[in-house]
Amino acid sequence: MSGTECPECGAGISQREGVDVGEIIACPDCGTKLEVKSLQPFAIDKAPSVEEDWGE
Ligand SMILES: [Zn+2]
């Protein structure tokens, strides 16, 4: 089982079965939304925020 680290808090993120590239998962530690970038090797990145602050 491969895993990686949360780019936000450094918590270990283990690859889950059925997870596919482009899926959004949440860090179990800090709750940051993470997008799966690659499965082999397992890689994630912070997902673009869907709740942008549009200001005025
Ligand atoms: Zn985290």
Image: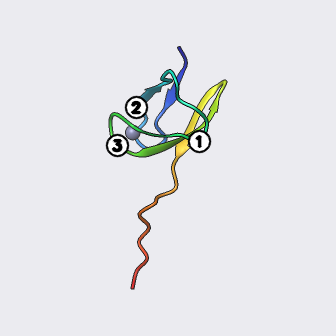
- Mark 1 close to ligand 1, CB under 8 Å: no
Q: Residue at x 67, y 24 (%)?
A: 40
The residue that disc 1 covers is: 22
Q: Label 3 vs label 2: CA separation?
A: 11 Å
Q: Label 2 vs label 1: CA separation?
A: 20 Å
The residue that disc 3 covers is: 31
Q: Say which mark, if any, is on residue 11.
A: 2
Label 3: which secondary element:
loop
Q: Earlier in the sequence, mark 3 or mark 2?
A: 2
Where is ligand 1, by quadrant?
Answer: top left
Q: Residues within 10 Å of mark 3 (few under 14, many from 20)?
A: few
Spot occupied by residue 56 in the image (x, y as percentages of width and height): 39, 85
Q: Say which mark, if any, is on residue 34.
A: none
Q: Residue at x 46, y 36 (%)?
A: 6
Which residue of the protein is positioned furthest toward the bottom in this rendering?
56
Q: Quadrant of residue 44?
A: top right
Label 2: which secondary element:
loop
Which residue of the protein is positioned furthest toward the front in this rendering?
18
Type of the residue with mark 3: Gly
Tell me: residue 19, above or below residue 48: above
